[in-house]
Amino acid sequence: MNQIPDIIRTIPLNYYLYFSTALFIIGVIGVLIRRNAIVIFMCVELMLNAVNLLLTAIASYRADTNGQVFVFFIMAVAAAEVCVGLAIIVMTYRNTRSTDVQLLNNLKW
Amino acid sequence: MLAFVLTLVLLLGIVIVLAYAERKVAAFMQDRLGPTEAGPYGSLQSVLDVLKLLQKEDIVPAAADKKLFKLAPILIFAAVFAGFAVIPFAPALVPAGIGIGVFYLLAIISLDVVGLLMAGWGSNNKYAMLGAMRSVAQIVSYEIPAGLAILSAVMVCQSLDFQEISYQQGALINQFPGLEYDMNWLFGIRELGINTTTIGGILTWNIFRAPMLLVSFVLYFIASLAESNRAPFDIPEAESELVAGFHVEYSGFRFAVLFLAEYSMMVLVSLVAVVLFLGSWNTPLPNIGPVSLAYWTSGTVGELSGILWGAFWLLSKTFVLLFLQLQIRWTYPRLRVDQLMHLCWKVLTPVALGVVLLAGIWRLLMV
Amino acid sequence: MTESLFYFLASLTLLCALMVVISRNPVHSVLFLIITFFTISGHYILLNAQFLAAVNIIVYAGAIMVLFLFVIMFLNMNKDSESRVKTSTLSKFAGTIAGGLLFVIMVAAVKDTTIAGYNADTFTSQTGMVETLGAVLFTQYLLPFELASVLFLVAMVGAVMLGKKEAGEQHF
C-alpha cells in the first residue's frame, strides 16, 4: 500500500524543476512573439500548466496534500479566467474584426 | 492485451446486432418488414453493410484540412473505446480495475467532443461545421446533468470504483475486499428493519437501495440520449436539415469507424446506466427463504459460471436499455435547439442538483 | 522502464508546447495544446496523482480547450487571416532571446540549490488519492472552496454581460 512509485525513486526532483521551467519559458516566448490574442491566451495556459506540474511534482515527492489542493484551485481559477477572457476577445473581434493585439494600442476608438 | 482484443470483438458483435436491431425495430414500429433478403430474416444485412463500406473509396475533399480530417474518426472511436476499459463485465472480470473508474470515464468521454470539432472543422463544409458545433454544444451541456446523476449514485455507494459499486448491489456484497461487514437494508433505511444483505436480487439494486436514484436514472438516461446524439436529440445530424451533420464528407472506412463510434457510445452509456443504477452484473432474482434464486443465478465468483452469469445479466439489461433507446427514436419528434437547451439547463440540471442533495442526506440516514 | 517513460513524456510535452507556439494555424495550435495537456496528465499519473490527472483532462482538454476551439471556429480564423498578422523577424528574435535569457537565469538560480527529495520514512503513496484530497479540501480549504464557487458565478455573469448584444451594434 505504501510503496514508493518508481518515478519518485529514480528521477530526482531537480529534473522536474528544469522540465517545468522549460515549459514555462516556451509559454513566455509564445506570449512575446505571437500577435494573435487567442494564441497568446493559450500560451498563458501553458505557463499555468507548467506551474501546476511543478506543484504536483513537489507535492508528490514530499507527500504533501496541500500542493495538490493548490493545483485544484489554480485549475478552477484558470477556468473562470478563460471564460471571461474569451468573451473579451470575442468583444474586441466584434469591434476591430481582428484578433491582432497590435490593433489594440489605443485606449479608445 | 487480451482484454483489449476481447472487448473489441465483443463490441463489434454487439454493434452489428444493434445495427440490425435498429432497422428491424424501426420497420416493426412503422409496420414495414425491414431487411429480408440477406440471410434468414435479413439477419446478415448489417454484415453486408460493413463489407460494402469497407470496399468503398476513401474520399478526402480537396479543400479539407487533411491531417485533421483523417485523424478525427480514429480519435472519436479511441475516446469512446477507452471508456470500456473500466466497465466490469462480471465479478472478477474487468479490463482495467482502477480506483477512480467513474471519474476516468467522465474524463475520457469528454474527449469525444474534440474529435467531433476536428471532424467538423477538417471537412471544410458548412453542414459539417454546423453539425459539429451543435453536437458539441449539446454534449457539453448534457454532460452536466449526466455527471450530477452519476454523482448521486457515487455518493450513495461511496466509491468511484465500478467493480465496488457492482458488488454493493447484490447478494455477493461481502465477497469484495473491504466490504466484508457491509449490510444492505431495504430502501437503504436501517429503521425499516428489513435486512436485504443475503436476499440480494432486484431489492439491492441501486434504484432500490436509495429510491431517489430512480429519478437520477431517468435523468441520466435522458442526458445519455443527448450525449450519444440519439433521437429525439439528434439535432446535430438531423438528416432533413443538415444532411448528416459532422460526418457529411466521410465515406468508406472512415465513415464505418464513425458509425461504429456512434453505436459504441450508445452501448457505453447503457452499460454505465446498468452498472450504476440497475444492479450491474447482479441477478434480478432474490433469495426467497430456502429458494436461493440469487445464488443459483450468480455462479461462483472467479470461476467460469460466475463470469458467464455475470456477462449474461449485464448484457441482457444493456440490451433492454438499448431497445428502449431505439423505441424512443421512432416515437418522439426531434427537439428544436432552444427546446433542447431549455430542457437541459432549466429542467434537468436543477432536478439533478436536488437529487444530489437528497442522495447526500439519504447516505447519512443509511449509515 | 519508468525512467524512459518520463523522458519520453517530457520530450513529447516540450515538443508539442513548441508546436503550439510555432503553428501558423490557430486550430492546430489548440490541438497541439490538447496533446500537451494529455502528456501532462500522463506525468500526473506517473506521480501517483490520479485525481489531478482526471481533473486536468476534464477541465483543460474537455472544457477549456473546447471553448478555445469554439471561439476560433466562431471567429472563422484560418491560415489566411493569420498570415496577415505576421510578427517581424526582428521581434521574433528579440522575443526568443529574451525568453532564452530568462531560462538561463532561472536554471542558474536553481542549479546550485539542493532540494530535498522524497523522505522514505514519512512518504505515503495516498497523497494524490481522491479520499485524501477530499478530506483536506473540505476541512482545511473549505472557505477557499466556497469562494471558488462565487468566483465561478462572477465569471459566468461577466461572460454573459460581455457577450450580450449592445443596442445599435452591428453584427456579423
Image: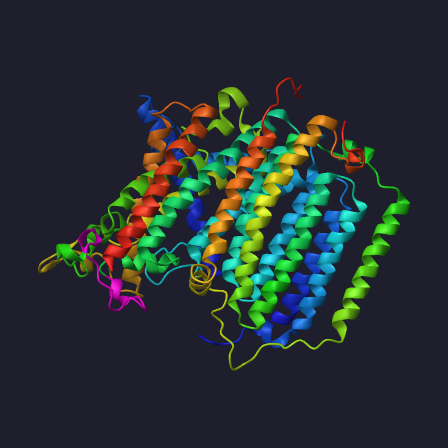
Residue segment shown in magenta? B172-189
In this view, the residue farthest toward the right is C90
**Is residue B174 one of those drawn in magenta?**
yes
Residue B81 x/y as whole percent:
49, 49
Could you tell me if residue B8 is visible in this image?
Answer: no
Q: Residue at x 57, y 31 (%)?
A: C161
In this view, the residue farthest toward the left is B290
Asked if residue B320 lies left or right of residue C97, the reply is left
Residue C58 x/y as whole percent:
52, 49
**Is residue B339 one of those drawn in magenta?**
no
Asked if residue C7 lies left or right of residue B251, the reply is right
Residue C55 x/y as whole percent:
52, 53
Q: Quadrant of residue B306?
A: bottom left
Magenta stretch prevailing secondary structure:
loop
**Which corner quadrant holds the C terminus of chain B?**
bottom left
Foreground pick, B336 / C136: C136
Foreground pick, B328 / A7: A7
Foreground pick, B44 / C23: C23
Would you place residue B214 above or below residue A18 in this image? above
Residue B192 x/y as whole percent:
13, 54
Q: Residue at x 54, y 56 (%)?
A: A72
Could you tell me if residue B64 is visible in this image?
Answer: yes
